[in-house]
Image: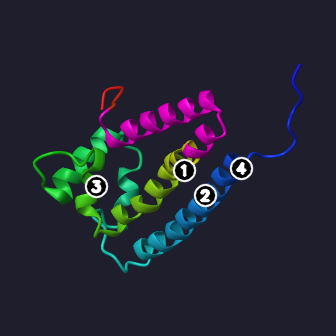
Amino acid sequence: MSEIKREATPEQLLYANILEKGMLVGLGLMFITFALYVLGIMKPVVPTDQIASYWSMPVHDYLVAINANFLHGDTLPTGWSWLKLISRGDFLNFIPIVILSGVTIICYIVIIPGLFARKDNAMGVIAVMTSLILILAASGILTTGGH
């Protein structure tokens, strides 16, 4: 039976350091973008005094309603189409969410060379596959459900 290691590997430390920095950046931006939104510094798509009336709606109905009432677009704002609305306070809040969601992908990509250099090929392959799956899922290429 193999002995349990009590020390973190260099890859584990690198992963943790990047994750910590990404979390701090995302959290800091979340406070900033939310303040810009609630203080009215950046105009939202949905006026703040009307947002509560949309809270109980299912996502699809909400998207239909804000498109009909405020955006007047040809299609519903789904997937990465929020980027077109980044200048609006309520959609600006998506930036820190993307950072917080994407930092894990960066962590995996950064540790891959070290895993293969250490001849930990199984973990290297797992890290490569995990990175690819997360990138494909975030891109919108891989979709599930009825959206």
Quadrant of the frame with the C terminus = top left
Marks 4,3: beta carbons within 8 A: no
Which residue is identified by label 4? 10
Specify the segment rendered in magenta.
113-141
Identify the residue position indicated by label 3 in the image.
Answer: 82
- Who's the residue at 57% across and 64% down the image? 27
Q: Which mark is residue 59?
A: none
Up-down relation of residue 51 to residue 58 (above or below) = below
Point out the image quarter for the N terminus: top right
Gap in angstroms between the C-alphas marked 2 and 1: 9 Å
For this view, does 4 lie left or right of residue 73? Answer: right
Alpha-carbon distance for marks 2 and 3?
Answer: 26 Å
Secondary structure of the residue carrying tag 2 is helix
Residue 109 is situated, as x and y percent measured from the top left of the image, at 51, 46
In the rendered image, residue 112, in percent from the top left (x then y), is placed at 55, 42
Judging by the rendered image, the residue that carries numbered circle 1 is 110
Of labels 1 and 3, the one closer to you: 1
- State the residue position of label 2: 18
